[in-house]
Amino acid sequence: MIELHGLDAGGYTRASKDIAVGTDLEGMSVEGQADDITEAADELGVNLVEIYDDNNLPGSKFATKERKDWGRLLADIKSGRIKVLIVWELSRGSRKYSEWGTFLDLIEEYDVPVHCITHERTYNPRNHKDMEILQLEGVKSHTESNMISARVRRGHAKARKKGRPHGTPRFGWQRIYDEKSGKMVSQVPHPGERPYVEEAFAFVLGGGSMVEGARDWAERNALSGDDSRYVPLTRGGKRWTYEVYRSMLLSPVHMGKFVDPKTGEMMSGNWEGFISEDVWWRVNNIIRAGQKPVGSRPAGAKYLMTFIARCDWCKCYMASGGKRGVPMLVCSGRGDDRAIQSTAKHLSIRMDWVDKAVKRALVKRLRDRDFIKALAARDTEGAREARAEAARLRAELDAMFEDVKARRGPITAAQYGEIAAAWEPDIEALLKKSTQGLDAGSALALELLRMAEEAGVEGDELDELLLEAVEDMPLGGQRALVKLFVPDVRIGRAKRRGGKGLDPDRIIIG
């Protein structure tokens, strides 16, 4: 018989998804567990100093979210604050072998009994039979975790076959659940988010840049909710980025479909979409068929200077690396043909140092009038006329829609798509003609300089304007400009090993 009277106790509650309140399973809820723990503490005669609560957090080995109160509980056991632990059932602790093993070692070392309410008994960590039971409970919990995972996978597969949605709802959508069973009833458009999705589709159909659209939404995130221009944050509670904006538009959920992750096949869902299939496919083709803004990220490129900058020691390209979480450029040992030339990593340098120096050099070269004249010479009269005509057609289209909105109110993406379809082939052909004779970097450079001329600034103001424009540009556009204007960037060795701070002489710009 273990004597517990007067000892300081802690209780631990956890539920993977606390939806049991108000149902026949209310006792399994975190609130129900806490009530039972309080009653058990009174019966045992212990002093309940704290209930550690990890609500809506799984204990599964597949869990990714940290259970902060579980960590606090272990720390308090180690410090001697908690002399007895009360749990509703043992699986509330952890379903991971490693975590459960650490827990058992801890209670054995600090002699902390564990009272399990559903077992109606207290386990003594100094009793080998009790510890054997606790070890077996850990194995059972781990096995149950695997079984739950298998059931979830089968459930998702069945849901896909029946056309039911699964996973986190996309922006623009919400799920309706049965209050008692917690089962999903339907998926319907989110009334507060749907208009923004329709706006984004209309914007892209009208020839709007994806980068501009994402940037506009990010700026409107910061407005007050009372402002008519306000755009809600992403489902993750963050401002919109190009990647998330693009992903939202490419999701077939908006036309009532989904992609089977195993087969890649487009399947019909059991919900009604609010974007027509015709409009969705138009936008999908615009995004995927090379009509996205010049300078979008090329496949594989994640950093500005990877496989552009070279090691000054061996002339091989610099690749990405990491040192204590800081992105680094590292000698890759690969030459022009990308064949392995050396396994040696001769040197490394912080990426942000190189990026900053290269962008400053880029801005200075963008102001080189002779170089720009050479670029402009490749810009044919036909290409300039095509750009002007495309701009005129877009302005005409925008003016027409502004007139329609003034007369009839807001326009849906479907309505926009039907009317804009008459202009699309002409605008697309003109845009293709407008870049003939120019590579991506040249086209971007001329566009930047036209913007600078319109701003009417010179000297340092012009430098800052160009630098800001380059910073706002997608990664692929920045790389295209660097390859054109700053193609020879080499990184030299540090003067001494372990030196802190940047030695500017290491960055050699030819």
Image (cartoon, helix red, strand yellow):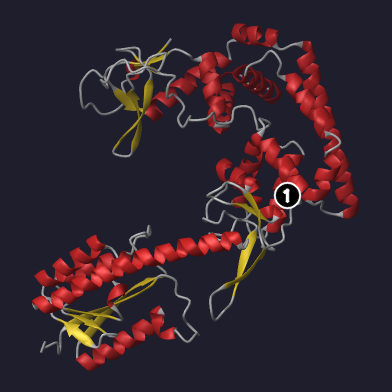
Residue placed furthest toward the bottom: 43
- From the viewer's perspective, tell me whether residue 495 is left or right of residue 160: left
Q: Where is residue 506 in the image (x, y as percent from the top left)?
A: 33, 17
Quadrant for the N terminus, please. Answer: bottom left
Image: 234 above or below 503: below
Between 269 and 2, the residue placed more toward the observer is: 269
Q: Residue at x 44, y 71 (%)?
A: 17
Q: Quadrant of the C terminus?
A: top left
Q: Which structural element holds mark 1?
A: helix
Task: Name the residue tied to disc 1.
Answer: 199
Residue 239 placement (x, y as % from top left) = 55, 49
Image coordinates for residue 84, horizontal then vertical, percent: 18, 80
Q: Viewer-proximal residue, 260 or 310?
A: 260
Q: In this view, does 478 lie to the left or right of 212?
A: left
Three-letter amino acid code of the residue under disc 1: Glu
Give above or below for 330 relative to 187: above
Number of on-image labels: 1
* Front residue of this view, candidates 182 and 206: 182
Which residue is at a point 52% across and 56% down the rendered structure image? Answer: 237
Nearer-the-camera pick, 443 or 190: 190
Residue placed at 18% from the left, 84% from the top?
Answer: 122
